[in-house]
Amino acid sequence: MRVGIIGAGAAGVFAAIQVKNNYPNARVEILEKSKKCLAKVKISGGGRCNVTTGIEEIAKICASYPRGKNQMKKILHQFGSVETKEWFQSRGVKLKTESDLRVFPISDDSQTIIDCLLQELKQKNIPISYQYPIDHIKLSKGDFEVSSKRHEHSRTYTYLIIATGGAPKIEGYTWLEKIGLQIIPPVPSLFTFNVPKSNVRKLMGIAVPHAIVKILGTKLISQGPVLITHWGFSGPAILKLSAFAARDLHQSGYDFTISINWTGTIDQNVLKENILFEQQKQGRRKISQVKLFGVPARLWTYLINKSSMSAEATFAELGSKSINKLIHMLCNDTYRIQGKTTFKEEFVTAGGIDLATVDTHSMESKTIPKLYFCGEVLNIDGITGGFNFQAAWSTAFIAGKLKSVS
Ligand SMILES: Cc1cc2nc3c(=O)[nH]c(=O)nc-3n(C[C@H](O)[C@H](O)[C@H](O)COP(=O)(O)OP(=O)(O)OC[C@H]3O[C@@H](n4cnc5c(N)ncnc54)[C@H](O)[C@@H]3O)c2cc1C
């Protein structure tokens, strides 16, 4: 039995290891377009590789997938974050879970993960053919004949696993569409928001731990840390929103309006009570000098000015109209977003192989028997936090079972 795996990223390499584990006599080989394998693993998580999530409950993990949420439920039952940790730990990789539940190798070095996977490939005698960009698949008498313009001869396999990752443009999937596969057009996910015309950028470096961000005109909302950068807004709440809104934002040409509640979930009546309390207690103090609701001092002054009030004003000078204005600004601070910036630490493609055409119990194509998929080539993507690698390990584990082997 000959098994070909296209793509030597996390998914392809993990799938190859699983196939050989399940079928020790199979001839397994990986075909890789570039000169390197596991290139994204190397740069992942800022070079530390956020290998999975510390969340173990499947329903909770699934909530982190804007695309593929329902399918991931079934997929994670076969191989979830617990199994991922066990798999690496049983091969000598020591892991740690950080306070935000991201899991990294204790070495803080992605090379540890790469070494572990390469060791497995070596032990199992699985070769990788580098500089082998597959651009054509021919179905021939139940076998797969795969070829590359760069190579004279094609290779034939009984089973084929596609693990080619995401592609930024639909053209990157043409060779797959040619064999009748359905592709959901790709759009970027996980990016930060640009505010080229706003003075808020002068506050770069300020982080607010519990903000709520809404995209106006939609129901999309996200809660968590927001970081002000020299080009706009970043931080987990923004990245999460960029993922869940990836398609809407692409359609808007990345020109949209957000509103930020810098106080998080504090009720507006409570905000008002607090301000009135300060007014009674220290009426002569300047409003800019009192730190309220955990809002950093420079941001507080900026918001006071943005509400057309003087930072020199005292609490005693605040009339009820001004108090309402201030509260409105704290809770509904709006910005026109014009453009996005790639988040260097992690980005993924939303889109890829349509999940409706894949049997998620086996990761086999519903239309072409013996053809399997795993990793980012599928229309599954997660927010930051180890969810994207988890999808790669899980789908590769299942694809590697080659369920249709008779
Ligand atoms: C900078 C960065 C940091 C990241 N950090 C994290 C993180 O810490 N945690 C996390 O969970 N996720 C992270 N991600 C996302 C994660 O890296 C991907 O989701 C994951 O690598 C997908 O694995 P894959 O094997 O499906 O695809 P890839 O890693 O993209 O691998 C696909 C492979 O297929 C090859 N290939 C493509 N087309 C062909 C072809 N036609 N023929 C032959 N070979 C082909 C490619 O060269 C590549 O080697 C990060 C992403 C980026 C860009």
Image (spheres, helix red, strand yellow):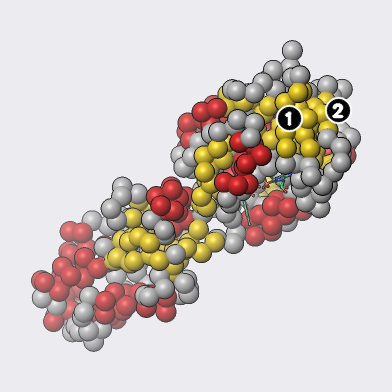
In-front residue for pair 233/363 = 363
The residue that disc 2 covers is: 27
> Seen in the image, is 381 located left or right of residue 375?
left
> Seen in the image, is 178 located left or right of residue 405?
left
Q: Earlier in the sequence, mark 1 or mark 2?
A: 2
Q: Quadrant of the N terminus?
A: top right
Marks 1/2: CA–CA distance:
20 Å
Which residue is at a point 51% across and 64% down the rendered structure image?
Answer: 341
Q: Secondary structure at mark 1?
A: strand
Above or below 202: residue 193: above
In-front residue for pair 115/168 = 168
CB at mark 1 closer than 8 A to ligand 1?
no
Q: Is residue 191 visible?
A: yes
* Quarter occupied by residue 107: bottom right
**At label 1, which amino acid type do we have?**
Lys
Which residue is at a point 69% across and 57% down the rendered structure image?
Answer: 43
> Seen in the image, is 327 located left or right of residue 74?
left
Above or below 55: residue 180: above
How busy is the neighbourhood of tag 1: few (under 14 within 10 Å), some, or many (20 plus)? some
Which residue is at a point 83% across and 26% down the rendered structure image?
Answer: 2
The residue that disc 1 covers is: 138
Outermost residue toward the top?
Answer: 406
Q: Secondary structure at mark 2?
A: strand
**At label 2, which amino acid type do we have?**
Arg
Residue 33 marker: none
How busy is the neighbourhood of tag 2: few (under 14 within 10 Å), some, or many (20 plus)? some
Q: Is residue 297 visible?
A: no
Q: Check contact, mark 1 vs mark 2: CB within 8 A.
A: no
CB at mark 2 closer than 8 A to ligand 1?
no
